[in-house]
Amino acid sequence: MSHAEHKDNEGAKLGMWLFLFTELLLFGGLFILYAVYLARYPEEFALAGAELNVIYGTANTVVLLTSSLFAAMAVTAIKRGQKGATMTLLAGTLACAGIFLVIKYVEWSAKIHHGIYPGSEKLVSGPPGESVFFGLYYLTTGLHGIHVIIGGALLAWIGAKVRSGAIHVADNVTLENGTLYWHLVDLIWIFIFPLYYLIL
Amino acid sequence: MSLAENAAPASDGFWQDSGRTGIRSWIFSTDHKRIGLLYLYSVLSFFLVGVILGLMLRLELMTPGRTIVDAETYNALFTVHGVVMIFLFIIPGIPASFGNLVMPIQIGARDVSFPRLNLLSWWLYAIGALIVLASLFTGGGAPDTGWTFYVPFSARTGTNVSLAVFGVFVLGFSSILTGINFVTTIHRLRAEGMNWGRLPLFVWSLYATAWVQILATPIIAITLVMVIAERTLGIGLFDPGRGGDPIMFQHLFWIYSHPAVYIMILPGMGVISEIIPVFSRKPIFGYKMIAVSSVAIAAAGSLVWGHHMYTSGMSDTAILVFSFLTFIVAIPSAIKVFNWVSTLYKGSISLEAPMLFALSFILLFSIGGLSGLILGAAATDIHVHDTHFVVGHFHYVMFGGTGFAFFAAAHYWLPKFYGRRYREKPALVAWALMFVGFNIVYFTMQVLGMQGMPRRYYDYLPEFAQLNLVSTVGSWILASGVILMVANLWRGLLQGEPFTGNPWGGATLEWSIPTPPPTENFEEDPVVTHGPYDFKGTGKP
């Protein structure tokens, strides 16, 4: 459109929140299955859940919460016009995303090494509840991992825009929306962590 | 595209005014009107593909045993007919084409809130459609699961289900983005004076639809991801041998796909709510009730998915609750029908093409809706479940409802955007052929279903032969009507009589701007001072 740009920041944020609803519902489908299968196989879920490494899970929770803190601080920084601090904080968020993925990789590798992966002999011949548990585990954490990557890429792109000056103190709704998305990634993990690592 | 040069008469509006030239001025345009027309051409093309597939299905069922294709091809035909008609025509149909064309103008905006997102959503639609089409010709052959992709068959069949399912996933993304865009636009971009009580009912229906798109579509997305994971990784979440439960697929699938029915029908109801008052020369009866009933249908319709599963294995309590909720949805639907009829009462009715399509919508939707109650009642459903009665029912609602509303909208709004109009007489003949043909095809199916003929069967008992022949002949009448209508629209919109001003006397904002609309829609930001059905001063008594 050629006419004078008038940015609607409230509208942009409303759109982002609506999109976040859809993301929550996407994971909602997996949480519904979790609830149904937990009710059906409580003992097998407890046994399978005990095989997950609480230390890895806790470490990743701390890492993601820290990353969200950095993201929130980046928003404050850009609103104060501190370009350098904004970029440093975004880099911190990205570093945390990287650490999260590395820990996840180590965790998955260990599981796969022990013969626990979808369709593995151990799961196919084992009790059905365990197979379902790990099926859900891989699908949920895998989908979440993809969201970490997408969120990281989004924040990297936003960081580049901050650097080039396209996002600045007077026009920062893109940064705010990007960090909203990042908080969503964090939030979903806050539900995954207790469901898979703690309550079973 | 050569369309652009031919189409516009004296005042050229948005057809001429574009920085780019040729096809690039369309597929990279962020103008909501151009995107709306892109969608229109796309969905109409896929509608015609779906019609051809439907005709082949009817031709195969004309006689018992093999008529034109073998059983495997028949399975692929009804699957692809369903996938094309549902995901490529009827879900994006009215909201993405006419919604994009008309809605921003009706609320007094220059465009939608996120024009680039709007274009992305068309691109995702195009990519999703290409992926679905590619699945027909690659891999193990066209999917043969039915459009519902039920497990365990969809997890095991050797046909190219994964690719088709991925295509539908991408199409879902497109649908979500349109929904987000419309909700934001309707909240943020209404012109001064366009308060919620002055919103045209078409906009209200799009608003309710957009919420369903946002809240329901993610569920189908995750379900389709699980089907793909089942096929590629053998994840076992729906495999009873591995602790999974195929019924869970059905629940998740219908949690989306039942509300999706309202994504399809609500915008159609919105179109009818626009056309009926204009051609009755009377303000709409019960504006508030129609507006609220759109939202009520969207809300209640999200809680009734279980009525697709009475025979799948649910507790009797669950069946009772779902059956009760299904009957609840009938209330807001009936509110709309009664209000339309009350609007007609003592109106000064003119039976032009848009009005005829709108009136037949009321009748056909009522037949479809009432036969839906037969299916919604648990006891009668056991008798007719998975028979041709169901096929007849949903074609009455989807084709007789949404389809006819789509054509009503085409005859009502397209002249406004092309600046030329179709010829009235062929339009009336086409409507008559379609209306008669439609009832022959689908009413016969309902009778066949009552007699016990199952759906999706390649072969049938000899006692069903006569009615199947009748139904097939009806499909030819219906198709000839469709061809005549499309040809008349095509010819008329490109070369027909000029169309200017406000010949039907509509009171919504799109009738207050030049024809075809300028790129920016409004010279100055409009200030709305009257309701959408306040016909005083629109030039017609």
Image (cartoon, coloured by chain):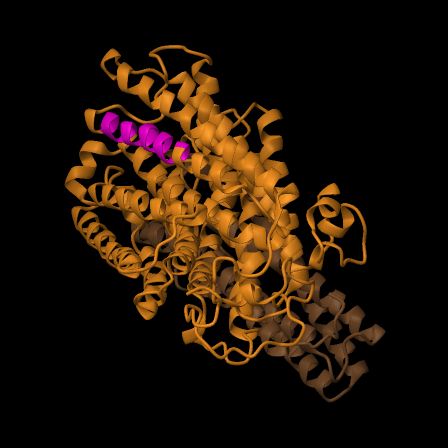
Answer left or right for A102 relative to B387: right
Expressed as whole percent of the image width and height from the top left, the position of residue B19 reads: 81, 58
Specify the farthest residue to the left. Answer: B379
Expressed as whole percent of the image width and height from the top left, the position of residue B365 reads: 32, 46
Along the line of sight, the residue nearer the viewer: B470 or B531: B531
Please state, as top left, top right, bottom left or bottom right, where the C terminus of chain A lies in the image: bottom left
Answer left or right for A30 relative to B364: right
- Residue B435 is a magenta residue: yes
**Chain in brown on the image:** A
**Image height check: is B226 above or below A144?**
above
Please state, as top left, top right, bottom left or bottom right, where the N terminus of chain A lies in the image: bottom right
**Chain in orange on the image:** B
Specify the farthest residue to the bottom. Answer: A80
Q: Residue drawn 62% across and 74% down?
A: A68
Q: Where does the magenta region start and end?
A: B433-449
Q: Residue drawn 75% across and 65% down?
A: A157
Any part of residue A91 in sight? yes
Along the line of sight, the residue nearer the viewer: A64 or B104: B104
Any part of residue A131 in sight? no
**Image height check: is B458 above or below B182?**
above
